[in-house]
């Protein structure tokens, strides 16, 4: 029997607010354990939470960017469960009245597009973090993360394979980062994903029993975990067994999932309205003010780059990987007027320099204006492409403009036709054997003469002019 996977993803994204969702504690990652905690985020008796307005605005940005319907009134609920890193014994979340529902995004798959639905987006607070001691059978609790604002993005069960799931996650991730509401750092846990996966006989409508997968900290691991789980469930079903409804952990080292616990249902959490928080009312003026702050989103920007700049889709995909990189490229195009040359330089030297030092484009010491000047110098014949490589490395290392580097290093390209003609004549006279071979039809010898000419000029001669003069003079033309 053929089986079809049915996958839904739940993504938790930490928001880039300065303060936590219900108190004034810092939401910054990396502080010493338990230094960003107060009576409010620890749920001490008598304290009252106060909603951070910026959290609502960031949630609305993502809701608008994913075509969601905005509910004008939403409220918070208490999600009750016990865990050592949840000091209140409940998590403030949203359940019955989420702020955003029925959205969608498009993903690119095999040259086409597929629309994947979004069930809901809601706000909630994060829990703390357990730090496990590898040398002793103990765990330590760091409550700095308690109360850090999250949005949870729940997809419809529209995903039909591990590759689709990875494409959907990447699309969500780049959207969050473009909106500048989440840094998307999966290693630090600011972008996390749980997956619900089940199998059903192909051609049927009813869903199978689902398993929830956790502990996937990269796009690759999400895809690997789903591929494994699909195979595991198929093996169970083909053997006449039943898939258990449970939560399973992904083991990256072993490449398998392990059973963790039975899967909870909503009633297990005993949701009820939080009595300390009033409903959130989103009026037209507030929503319009947020809508005006939305940037051009990455998919649309890629399509515009291909359409307006006539660059390949691959180039556009690389150049829109981040909002800062796309802005850098567009500024370079504006200053140089050369979209494809600009693409080549950014994707080539600039990204190579940055990747070697594991830096982002924001840390690049070569400003778009300086790189545009370098492109103009190449086009004017002042320096060759090979010289430009040397100049660009020095620009990255020192931050100096190209003209200053060219002057200091004496890299001006030789374009004096008379001087080059005299020099080539000497080379031909000094190599009669190679001249005879060339005139006998051995065209590969031409490269020898080019090499001798470039060596004589220390690589400073205009390559095209050298080629033209050599062809003429080796043929015996005057």
Image (cartoon, rainbow, N blue to C red):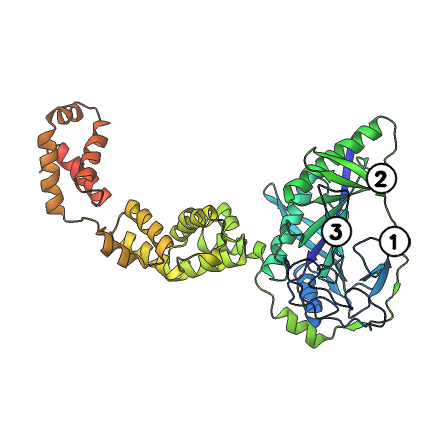
Q: Is residue 4 visible?
A: yes
- Looking at marks 3 and 2 on the same chain, the residue that comes earlier in the sequence is marked by 3
* 435 sits left or right of 97 in the view: left
- Asked if labels 2 and 3 touch by Cβ distance under 8 angstroms, the answer is no
Q: Residue at x 85, y 62 (%)?
A: 78
Mark 3 vs mark 2: give the one in front: 3
Residue at (39, 57) in percent of width and height: 366
Q: Please name the residue that numbered disc 3 is placed on.
A: 140
The residue at which mark 1 appears reads as 266
Report, in whole angstroms, how far the alpha carbon at label 1 lies from the one at label 3: 29 Å
* Rendered view: 398 above or below 446: below
Q: Is residue 211 above or below residue 294?
A: above
Relative depth, front residue between 472 and 29: 29
Mark 3 Cα within 10 Å, few/some/many (few <14, many 20+)?
few
- Helix, strand or loop under label 2: loop
Counting from the top left corner in percent of width and height, residue 228 is at 73, 34
Q: Nearer the viewer, residue 242 or 393?
A: 393
- Element on which disc 1 rests: helix
Image quadrant containing the C terminus: top left
User: In the rendered image, which quarter is residue 59 located in?
Assistant: bottom right
Which residue is labeled 2 in the image? Answer: 208
Residue 272 image offset from top left, x and y in percent: 89, 63
The x and y percentages for residue 183 are 61, 57
* Label 2 – label 1 distance at C-alpha: 18 Å
Task: Tell me the quarter of the image containing the N terminus.
Answer: top right
């Amino acid at each position: 029997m053929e089986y079809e996977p049915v996958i839904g993803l739940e993504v938790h994204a930490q928001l880039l607010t300065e303060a936590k969702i219900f108190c004034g504690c810092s939401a910054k990652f990396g502080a010493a354990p338990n230094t960003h905690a107060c009576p409010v985020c620890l749920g001490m008796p008598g304290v009252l939470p106060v909603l951070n307005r910026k959290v609502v605005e960031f949630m609305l940005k993502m809701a608008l960017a994913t075509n969601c319907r905005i509910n004008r009134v939403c409220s918070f609920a208490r999600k009750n469960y016990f865990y050592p890193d949840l000091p209140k014994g409940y998590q403030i979340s949203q359940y019955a009245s989420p702020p955003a529902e029925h959205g969608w995004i498009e993903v690119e798959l095999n040259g086409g597009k597929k629309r994947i639905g979004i069930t809901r987006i809601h706000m909630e607070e994060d829990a703390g973090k357990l730090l496990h001691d590898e040398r002793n059978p103990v765990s330590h609790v760091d409550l700095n993360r308690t109360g850090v604002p999250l949005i949870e993005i729940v997809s419809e069960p529209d995903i039909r394979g591990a590759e689709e799931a990875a494409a959907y996650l990447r699309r969500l991730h780049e959207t969050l980062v473009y909106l500048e509401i989440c840094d998307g750092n999966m290693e630090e846990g600011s972008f996390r994903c749980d997956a619900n996966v089940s199998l059903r006989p192909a051609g049927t409508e009813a869903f199978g029993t689902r398993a929830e997968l956790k502990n996937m900290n990269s796009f690759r691991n999400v895809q690997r975990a789903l591929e494994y789980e699909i195979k595991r469930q198929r093996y169970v079903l083909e053997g006449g067994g039943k898939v258990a409804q449970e939560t399973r952990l992904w083991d990256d080292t072993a490449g398998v999932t392990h059973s963790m616990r039975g899967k909870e249902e909503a009633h297990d959490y005993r949701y009820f309205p939080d009595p300390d928080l009033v409903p959130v009312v989103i009026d037209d003026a507030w929503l319009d003010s947020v809508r005006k702050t939305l940037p051009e989103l990455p998919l649309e920007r890629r399509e515009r780059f291909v359409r307006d700049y006539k660059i390949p889709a691959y180039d556009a995909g690389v150049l829109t990987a981040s909002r800062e990189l796309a802005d850098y490229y567009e500024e370079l195009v504006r200053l140089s007027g050369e979209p494809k040359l600009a693409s080549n330089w950014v994707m080539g030297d600039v990204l190579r320099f940055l990747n070697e030092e594991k830096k982002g484009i924001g840390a690049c010491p070569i400003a778009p204006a300086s790189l545009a000047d370098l492109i103009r110098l190449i086009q004017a014949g002042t320096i060759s492409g090979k010289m430009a490589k040397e100049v660009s490395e020095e620009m990255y290392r020192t931050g100096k403009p190209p003209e200053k580097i060219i002057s200091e290093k004496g890299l001006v390209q030789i374009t004096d036709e008379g001087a080059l003609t005299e020099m080539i004549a000497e080379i031909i006279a000094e190599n009669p054997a190679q001249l005879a071979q060339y005139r006998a039809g051995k065209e590969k010898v031409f490269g020898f003469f080019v090499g001798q000419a470039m060596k004589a000029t220390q690589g400073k001669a205009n390559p095209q002019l050298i080629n033209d003069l050599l062809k003429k003079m080796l043929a015996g033309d005057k």
